[in-house]
Structure formats: structure tokens, C-alpha cells
């Protein structure tokens, strides 16, 4: 009945879930599919063969990052309307393959794509292919990168091809020990080809016959091309992007294997190398070609050129007087970074006057040219660039810079002077730490050959190409995990918000040991200022930033600042909005030193404050006070010390931040948060980040104190349970992150009030199963939940949890990684299998069969039993009584149990001389005197008590012995085999079996041809080991004694044949 109720309950749950809209389409399991079954995603499924897919609606299949090494002829016969096919990185070649992967070689049947008449995009990179299969004429994009294709001699027969990608088929990480070759005939039929990539292929020259239709890319980087002949690109009038970088590589600071041209010569260029009648090139990269100069007029035909990358060459001596700049009048972006002369640091950098002809130049990159200062003439040149917005001067060892002159440029808004040697100390200072600055003031016209004390420059050659040109100050945003939804910005977001198109100075990583009036000369109108990594050891008492009247963003991270004084930053109280003083832990780590944050009260416009990674723990202000701060980053401190249970000094530390909406207290080693602390947090908080701590307890019942909370992050903690009582969440909470904890159960009452919850993260916990009787609200209809993460949990996969699979398939909630990272952990037989691999129908069949069987059994029982009772009631009662008596047997009367004095009573025919002789000379000698265990035997002639009758002695001997050994022979005179004593002993043993249920009989036959008695035959079938025969072969006698000892030591009932019923006893 219980099973039938469980089946009914499951049916009701299935009915409830089936009412939901199906969004998780697993029609092609283990692959994902969109709702319309047009796109099939099999990426990263560890597939070893192409799955069988039959559908007329599928137009796109992704089989990337699997282990497919063979593609059969009919692999795609079921998807005739396929338009896009990706089979990427299934078998990478040579050194590109992971170390733990064995060698592989993908084999694609030559005719596999013949039936795909609509195939438009084909991606086959990273498969170690050695040849190109037959391709359909409809193909527009063909990706063959990272393979082992070294030559293409036959036409591809794809007249509609627009993109052909052949990069990295022959280079140092995928060696072919020859030059890549592609025939002119291949290009003759490609009249629509627009994008061609041939980088990393050991090409020694530009391929001939390039189609004139090329417009998007001429990607020829990292080959071994030594010269660009006149008219090489003359017929490519539509070409827009041309990359020829790293062909004659400069190797004195290479970050990867470097291959210079023979004799360390530069790339050989000619005046008409880039000539075309009406060139369309807008981006040209000649980076890393060891160039020292350019032929006259080489850039003259490039009328549309906007971006030019000349970095990593040897143009240091060409920049002061180069005339080629005069032909770059339309340029807006130019990179001259890392053009330094080996082993030389110039006193001044002098820019060619012809640079002033580039009137539209907006971005000038001069990083890594190694000079002390910009010459006055260079400043004059820059002053004529009226549209210049960005000037990058990083890593040049600059000791002196006239910022006032630079700020005179009308459009200049981004000045990057980071990674230099600026100190801004007045000349004549005698402080030992100012020696570097004195050199910058007094030693003019100096360049040094002591290059060995300069830091090694290591720069990766990989940069984005084409329209993804690297520009300075491009921040690496520290945003949230892309799987998480948050409207709360990071510090880098604030930099973008407040500094975009505003005057910005980056002076990070210099030698500024303190801030004073000399530092900010020329920066009076700066809106954003970066001073990080200067290691200032200074007490800020106010007035240091007095000259900066419009400062909004200030970065003072990674210093040794003393923040004790209340007047710190007071001169910025009307302008400063973002203050980063993170990683200033030097003074906070000094034991016994006091600290104060009273300066915050005066900064009335401050909105964003970072105090992260300062090791703040004690002897500080009792609290932070500000009516303007909205975002506070307090991660990487020691709130665990401040909030110890025996210390209530800092329980209201954040309470007076009355406008706070975002609080990050992650990485604070917190093990718990008390109710008092949570209640004393500002009620205005909308986002609370407590991730990456050691929390085992959280006061959920006091969460109502945060009435505006909409984002709560408790990930990466040690929470192991959620309360069973309803939690008083306010209606604003939309995101709750409980991932990376140790939760094993999700109680329904906990989520009862979370009606506005939209994003819930429960991945990477210890959830084994969900109770379908107590489903949280977000599993049911009417919930506001949009996204739920459950992957990386040790799920149990059996029929009791089959409803969960149905939920995953039918829920409208977005549940990522259903087919890839939701796997069974229990039972062991299903470990590692996808949770969707459970067959719900088999569970339904099991339940249905059991329910049918139970119902049939009950029907028959309730029909037959009354009938049998009416007809054969008395007979059935009598049979039951007999069966019960046979099962229960006789019971011994109380008090009749006695202790056994002997191990065995040996009964034999005392009149048989041979038997008598065997008992006394063989049996008693071996059992009583030899062996690891000796036995106490009872013999008639030796141990019976004189004066008692024979029957009394016999009864005592049988009942006081554990076993009774019957020694039987054929008889001395051919008469009866047993005498009266033996018969009486046998009856007593049988009576003992019935009364006590103790089988004590052991039979020893001295004759092999013993008469076939019925009892003896039955005994052999029932308990063969209790019937022994004395062997005539002396060598077999030790085995006989061993078997006899085992028979005397064992319980005969346990030696019974399993096929014999106990009812025979």
C-alpha cells in the first residue's frame, strides 16, 4: 500500500511539473538544443564519435572540444539542412596538445560533407588534419587553423568562399620542417574571398595570385618573409587590414621563441612595396621586423591609412629625423613602443618635426624607448598636434617631465607616465633617496651604456589585430562572474565612468616617495590621478593636493600611507568622488599603533571608497562615518578580530555610513556574524558581499534589518545548513548566492518569503537529492525565479529522484550546465553519468508493474480467502496447527540441561575383537594423546560407573557427551552389524535430537563394504561429513583423523546439505 501511495504521489508531481513550459530541450542528449531545435551544442562532452542526430530543423551543430578522432561518411546524413558545423580542438597537433593527451590524428571521410548542400560555415581547426575533405560549393567560411596541412595544390571548388583561415599549420609549436605552400590555382576560383589568414606558417614570401576581392584581412604575421617586393599588393585595391608583423623578429627581449632574418637583417622593404592604384588599407602592422628606416615614399600610396603599428623595431635613431611621417597625414593612431636602441638610454627623446604634419593624430604611443626626458623640440612638435588625446610614455626611465607644457595641448586628456623614474623632488636636495632625481636635474646631455641595471623588458608579441588595436589605459575590468547578474560596478567601472574623456594622469610605478606641491605642477586641472605603486611613506595631514582643484578620482593604492589625521584629503572635500587607498597595510600591521578614519566625515562628495587589503583589525576608529559614501570595498582585512565574541567595540563599525548601498567584506576570515552586528549594518545596503570567508553560521532571522537588500553573496564559505523556519526576507531580495558551501538540504520554509528572488546560486555544494514533498517555491509555478544553478553537486540518481529530471526538462527557469556539469555521484554504478541519463520511463514501468502486481494480489486474496474459509475452514485450521508444531518442534523442560563432561561417547561392539582393538589402539591414542587439540572420550569398559545398571550408564554417557561416535563393522561372525547397546544408544541420540534439537551422531565405518542401511544412506545425504570410513591405505589415515576431529568439533546442524529441509530434523 505504501508503494502504491508513493507511485500515486509521483504521478501527481509529474502532472504538476508537466504544466510548465518546456525550455530545456535535450532531444539530442547528451547535447543541448535551443527551444526550436535548430542549434545543437555538443561542446565539451568528451564524445568519441559524432552522435546520431536526425532532424530537418537543425541548422547548426557544435562538436568542439571533444575526443572525436573519426568522422564516418554518414555522420551527418540525418541533418541535411545543416548550415554551420564546428568540429574544433578535438585533436590538436604536436606541442599544442595537452601533456596528458596521447598522440592522435583525426580522420574525416572524404565524402562526409557531400550531402550537406546548405553548409555555409565549416570550422575544422585544431584537429591535426593532413588533407582537406570534399567541400560543398555553398561554403562561405572555412577554418583550417591549427592543423597539419602544409600544402594546398588543388582548387577547393568553393566559388562562394569568403573567409579562409589557415593560421598555425606550420610553426615552431607545430613544426613541419618546410615552407607552407599554396598554389595560385587555389585563388583563381575564389572570386569572393574577403578574409585570408596565413600567419604562423613558415612562409618565405607573399603567396602569388592573391584574389583582388580581399578586403578584411591580409594576416601574414610570424612567418619567415624576408622581403616585400614592389607591387606585391598592387592588385589588392580593396584590402583594409594588413598585418606583416614578426617576420624578421627582434630577439633581444623576446618573450617566446624568436627567429630573426639571416644576418639579423630587417624586413626588406621597397618604395612601392605597398603600392596600389587606390589603396584601401586603413590598418598596417609592421611590428617586430627589426626595421631601422623606411624607403622614401613607401607610405605615400596609403591615403586611407588610419592606424600604423611600428612597435618592437629599431627606430630609436630614426624618430628624431625620419621623413616618412610626412606621408602619414591621415593617421589617427601610431605605436612606436619598444623601439629602444640596445644597451643605450638617451638623455632626451627628440621627435621628428614631420610628425607635426599628422594633424589628425589622436593616439601616440612611445612606451619603451628609454630616455630621460622629452626634448623642448619634441614638446614643440607635440604642441602642434591639436587633436592628440592620448600620449603614452610608459617604461622610459624618465626622470624629468614638463607636465605644464604637455597640458597646453588642447585635446590631450590621457597622459600615461607610469613605470618611469619620476620623483618630483627639488634640485639640490641632499636626501640619499633623491640621488636619482639629482641626476635628472644636473646631468644633462647624458646617455648611459650601463644598460645592465635597467630592468629586463619582456613583452608578449601577441596583441589584438585589426580593429582590436591595443590602446593605453585599457582597464582589465574586475567585474562579477559572467554567470552572475549584478548592477553594482567595480573600481575599474568607476574609473571608466568618471575618467572617460576627462584629463587623466597615470604616475603609477615611479619613484615618488611623497606628495607635495612640486608633484602636481601641470596637473592642476586633472580629474583622475593614478599614483599607485610608488611606496610613499607619508602621514597625510592635509594640503598635499591643494593645487588639484578638480580631482574626482584618486588612486593611492600600494603605499605606506599614515591615515591618522582628520585633516587628510580635506582640500578635496568638494570634488573627490572615488578614493582608492587599498593595500596600504604597512602601518596597520604595526602592533600598538593607532589609526583613525575621521577624515571621511569631511569628504562630503566621496561616493566610492576602497580600504581593501589593509589588514585592518584593531586600535582604529570605532566606526566609519560618512553621509556620502555609497560603495565601500573592505575585503582583505581582519573583521574576524574586530568582531570577536568578547569584543563589542566595533559592532557598529559601518552603522554611520548612512548612504551606503554596496558593502564588500569578503576575505576577512569571518567564521560567524552575530545578530547584533548584522542589525547594526546600515539599513540602506542593497548589496552585501561576504564571500570567501569561513562562515559556518549566519543570522538569517535578523536579515529583516536590511530592508533594502537585493543582493546577498555568501559564496565560498562553510555554511552547512539553512534554517527550517521561514526567513523574513524583504521583497527586494532578487539575488542570493550560496554557491561553494557545504549545504546538503534545501528546506521549503526557508524560501517561503522569497517571492521576489530571481537569481539563486546553489552550485558546488553537497546536495544529494531534493525532497519532492517539500519543494521550495522556486520549483513551482508562479515563482519569479529566472536563473538557478545546481551544477557540481553530488546528486543521487534513482527512481526516488526521477521527478527531478522531469523538472529539469520542463522548468522555464534557466539552469546552466544541465547536460555538462550535473552528474550522478550515487549510486557508485552511475557515478560520473549525466543526471539526465536516468530513464524516467523505466522508473514509471517499475512502479506501474509493482502497482499492477499488488492490486492483482489483493484482488485474488480478498476473493479466494472467504471462499476457502467457507469450504475448508476446519481443514485449513488443522493443517496450520500441524505446520506450526512441525516448525516449532519440542522444547526441553526447564532444569534438564546439564554440563557435558566428555567430548564424545564412543559406542562399539565390545565382543568384536577387531573393533575393540581398533578403538583402544588407534582411536583413543590419536584423539586423546596427539594433535593440537585432545578430546575427552567416554568408553563403556573404562568410564562407566560400576554398580549402576547398563541403561543408566548408557543414558548418562549419551547426555553427558557432546557427540556420540558409533564405530560400526560388519560383525565378527557375519551376524548383525549392531548389538543391543548400540541400538539403545542410537535411540537415545535420536531422542536428544527431538528434545534438544542437537544432532550428536558421528558414524565411523571400519568396513568399506558396509551393508546399505536406509538410515545410513539418508545420513550421508543429510550430513555427509558426519559419516566417516576408515581407509585401508595408510597414507590416507592422517586425512581421516583430521576429518574426525572436525566432525567432533563442529555442529552437525550447520553441516547439513542446504537442499535438505529443516523439517526432516
Image: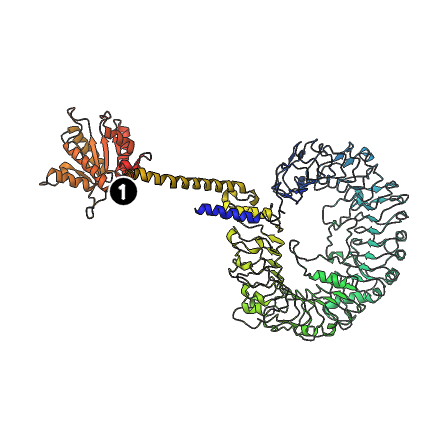
User: Residue most toward the left?
Assistant: 947
Quarter holding the C terminus is top left
For this view, does 201 lie left or right of residue 349?
A: left
For this view, does 794 lie left or right of residue 299?
A: left
Relative height, residue 388 to residue 919 (above, below): below
Say whether residue 699 is visible.
Answer: no
For this view, does 1007 lie left or right of residue 558?
A: left
| x and y percentages locating residue 376 in the rendered image | 86, 63
Say whether residue 919 is visible.
Answer: yes
* Of 374 and 791, the residue lying toward us: 791
Specify the quadrant of the image occupied by residue 131: top right
* Kind of element beneath mark 1: helix
| x and y percentages locating residue 730 in the rendered image | 60, 64
**Residue drawn at (35%, 40%), measured in percent from left and top?**
865
* Of 351 and 933, the residue lying toward us: 933
User: Which residue is identified by label 1?
Assistant: 888
**Residue drawn at (52%, 40%), measured in percent from left and top?**
842
Amino acid at each position: 500500500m505504501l508503494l502504491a501511495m508513493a507511485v500515486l504521489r509521483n504521478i501527481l508531481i509529474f502532472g504538476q511539473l508537466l504544466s510548465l513550459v518546456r525550455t530545456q530541450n535535450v532531444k539530442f542528449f547528451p547535447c543541448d538544443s535551443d527551444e526550436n531545435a535548430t542549434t545543437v551544442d555538443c561542446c565539451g562532452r568528451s564524445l568519441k564519435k559524432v552522435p546520431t542526430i536526425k532532424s530537418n530543423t537543425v541548422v547548426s551543430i557544435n562538436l568542439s572540444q571533444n575526443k572525436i578522432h573519426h568522422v564516418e561518411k554518414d555522420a551527418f546524413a540525418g541533418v541535411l539542412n545543416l548550415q554551420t558545423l564546428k568540429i574544433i580542438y578535438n585533436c590538436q597537433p604536436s606541442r599544442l596538445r595537452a601533456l596528458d593527451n596521447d598522440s592522435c590524428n583525426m580522420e574525416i571521410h572524404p565524402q562526409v560533407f557531400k550531402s550537406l548542400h546548405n553548409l555555409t560555415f565549416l570550422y575544422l581547426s585544431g584537429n591535426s588534419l593532413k588533407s582537406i575533405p570534399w567541400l560543398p560549393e555553398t561554403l562561405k567560411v572555412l577554418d583550417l587553423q591549427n592543423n597539419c596541412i602544409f600544402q594546398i595544390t588543388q582548387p577547393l571548388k568553393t566559388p562562394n568562399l569568403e573567409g579562409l583561415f589557415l593560421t598555425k599549420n606550420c610553426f615552431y609549436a607545430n613544426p613541419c620542417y618546410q615552407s607552407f605552400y599554396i598554389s595560385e590555382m587555389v585563388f583563381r576560383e575564389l572570386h569572393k574571398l574577403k578574409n585570408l589568414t596565413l600567419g604562423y606558417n613558415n612562409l618565405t614570401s607573399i603567396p602569388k595570385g592573391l584574389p583582388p576581392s580581399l578586403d578584411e584581412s591580409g594576416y601574414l604575421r610570424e612567418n619567415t618573409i624576408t622581403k616585400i617586393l614592389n607591387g606585391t599588393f598592387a592588385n589588392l585595391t580593396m584590402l583594409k587590414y594588413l598585418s606583416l608583423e614578426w617576420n624578421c623578429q627582434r630577439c633581444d627581449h623576446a618573450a617566446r621563441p624568436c627567429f630573426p632574418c639571416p644576418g639579423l637583417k630587417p624586413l626588406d622593404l621597397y618604395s612601392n612595396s605597398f603600392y596600389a592604384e587606390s589603396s584601401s588599407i586603413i590598418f598596417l602592422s609592421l611590428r617586430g621586423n627589426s626595421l631601422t628606416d623606411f624607403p622614401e615614399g613607401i607610405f605615400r600610396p596609403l591615403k586611407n591609412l588610419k592606424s600604423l603599428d611600428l612597435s618592437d623595431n629599431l627606430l630609436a635613431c630614426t624618430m628624431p629625423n625620419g621623413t616618412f611621417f610626412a606621408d602619414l597625414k591621415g593617421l589617427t593612431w601610431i605605436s612606436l613602443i619598444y623601439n629602444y636602441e640596445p644597451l643605450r638610454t638617451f638623455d632626451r627623446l627628440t621627435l621628428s618635426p614631420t610628425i607635426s604634419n599628422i594633424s589628425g593624430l589622436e593616439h601616440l604611443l612611445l612606451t619603451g624607448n628609454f630616455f630621460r626626458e622629452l626634448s623642448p623640440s619634441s614638446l614643440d612638435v607635440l604642441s602642434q598636434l591639436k587633436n592628440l588625446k592620448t600620449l603614452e610614455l610608459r617604461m622610459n626611465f624618465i626622470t624629468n617631465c614638463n607636465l605644464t607644457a604637455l597640458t597646453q595641448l588642447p585635446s590631450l586628456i590621457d597622459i600615461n607616465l607610469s613605470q618611469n623614474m619620476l620623483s618630483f623632488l627639488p634640485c639640490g636636495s641632499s636626501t640619499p633617496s633623491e640621488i636619482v632625481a639629482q641626476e635628472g636635474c644636473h646631468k644633462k646631455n647624458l646617455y648611459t651604456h650601463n644598460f645592465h641595471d635597467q630592468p629586463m623588458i619582456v613583452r608578449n608579441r601577441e596583441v589584438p589585430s585589426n580593429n582590436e588595436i591595443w590602446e593605453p589605459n585599457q582597464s582589465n575590468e574586475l567585474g562579477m562572474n559572467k554567470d552572475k547578474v549584478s548592477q553594482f560596478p567595480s573600481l575599474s567601472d568607476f574609473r571608466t565612468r568618471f575618467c572617460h574623456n576627462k584629463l587623466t594622469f597615470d604616475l603609477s610605478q615611479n619613484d615618488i616617495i611623497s606628495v607635495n606641491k612640486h608633484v602636481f605642477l601641470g596637473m592642476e586641472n586633472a580629474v583622475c590621478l593614478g599614483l599607485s605603486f610608488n611606496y610613499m611613506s607619508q602621514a597625510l595631514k592635509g594640503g598635499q593636493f591643494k593645487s588639484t582643484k578638480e580631482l574626482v578620482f584618486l588612486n593611492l593604492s600600494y603605499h605606506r600611507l599614515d591615515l591618522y589625521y582628520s585633516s587628510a584629503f580635506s582640500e578635496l572635500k568638494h570634488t573627490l568622488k572615488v578614493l582608492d587607498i587599498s593595500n596600504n597595510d604597512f602601518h596597520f600591521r604595526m602592533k600598538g599603533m593607532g589609526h583613525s578614519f575621521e577624515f571621511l566625515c569631511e569628504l562630503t562628495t566621496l561616493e566610492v571608497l576602497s580600504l581593501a587589503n589593509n589588514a585592518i583589525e584593531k586600535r582604529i576608529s570605532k566606526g566609519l562615518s560618512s553621509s556620502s559614501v555609497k560603495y565601500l570595498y573592505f575585503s582583505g582585512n581582519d573583521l574576524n578580530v574586530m568582531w570577536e565574541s568578547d569584543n563589542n567595540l566595533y559592532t557598529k563599525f559601518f552603522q554611520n555610513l548612512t548612504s551606503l548601498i554596496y558593502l564588500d567584506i569578503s576575505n576577512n576570515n569571518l567564521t560567524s556574524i552575530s545578530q547584533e552586528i548584522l542589525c547594526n549594518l546600515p539599513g540602506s545596503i542593497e548589496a552585501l558581499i561576504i564571500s570567501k570567508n569561513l562562515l559556518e553560521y549566519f543570522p538569517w532571522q535578523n536579515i529583516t534589518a536590511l530592508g533594502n537588500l537585493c543582493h546577498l553573496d555568501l559564496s565560498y564559505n562553510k555554511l552547512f545548513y539553512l534554517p527550517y523556519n521561514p526567513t523574513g526576507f524583504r521583497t527586494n531580495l532578487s539575488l542570493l548566492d550560496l554557491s561553494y558551501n557545504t549545504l546538503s538540504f534545501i528546506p521549503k520554509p526557508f524560501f517561503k518569503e522569497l517571492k521576489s528572488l530571481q537569481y539563486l546560486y546553489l552550485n558546488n555544494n553537497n546536495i544529494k537529492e531534493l525532497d519532492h514533498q517539500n519543494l521550495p517555491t522556486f520549483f513551482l509555478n508562479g515563482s519569479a525565479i529566472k536563473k538557478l544553478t545546481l551544477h557540481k553537486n553530488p546528486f543521487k540518481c534513482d527512481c526516488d529522484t526521477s521527478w527531478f529530471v522531469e523538472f529539469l526538462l520542463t522548468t522555464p527557469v534557466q539552469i546552466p550546465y544541465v547536460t555538462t556539469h550535473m552528474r550522478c555521484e550515487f549510486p557508485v554504478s552511475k557515478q560520473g553519468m549525466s543526471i539526465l541519463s536516468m530513464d524516467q520511463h523505466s522508473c514509471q514501468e517499475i512502479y506501474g508493474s509493482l502497482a499492477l502486481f499488488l492490486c492483482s494480489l489483493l484482488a485474488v486474496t480478498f476473493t479466494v480467502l472467504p471462499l476457502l474459509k467457507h469450504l475448508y475452514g476446519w481443514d485449513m485450521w488443522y493443517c496450520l496447527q500441524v505446520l506450526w508444531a512441525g516448525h516449532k518442534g519440542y522444547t526441553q523442560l526447564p532444569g534438564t540441561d546439564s554440563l557435558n563432561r566428555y567430548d564424545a561417547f564412543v559406542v562399539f561392539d565390545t565382543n568384536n575383537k577387531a573393533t575393540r582393538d581398533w578403538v583402544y589402539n588407534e582411536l583413543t591414542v590419536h584423539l586423546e594423546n596427539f594433535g593440537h587439540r585432545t578430546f575427552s572420550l567416554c568408553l563403556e569398559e573404562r568410564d562407566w560407573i560400576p554398580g549402576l545398571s547398563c541403561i543408566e550408564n548408557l543414558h548418562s554417557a549419551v547426555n553427558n557427551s557432546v557427540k556420540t561416535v558409533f564405530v560400526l563393522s560388519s560383525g565378527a561372525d557375519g551376524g548383525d552389524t549392531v548389538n543391543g547397546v548400540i541400538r539403545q544408544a542410537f535411540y537415545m541420540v535420536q531422542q536428544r535430537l527431538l528434545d534438544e534439537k542437537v544432532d550428536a551422531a558421528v558414524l565411523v565405518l571400519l568396513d568399506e563394504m558396509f551393508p546399505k542401511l536406509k538410515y545410513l544412506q539418508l545420513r550421508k545425504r543429510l550430513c555427509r561429513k558426519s559419516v566417516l570410513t576408515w581407509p585401508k591405505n595408510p597414507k590416507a589415515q592422517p586425512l581421516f583423523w583430521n576429518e574426525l576431529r572436525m566432525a567432533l568439533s563442529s555442529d552437525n546442524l550447520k553441516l547439513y546439505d542446504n537442499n535438505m529441509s529443516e523439517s526432516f530434523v
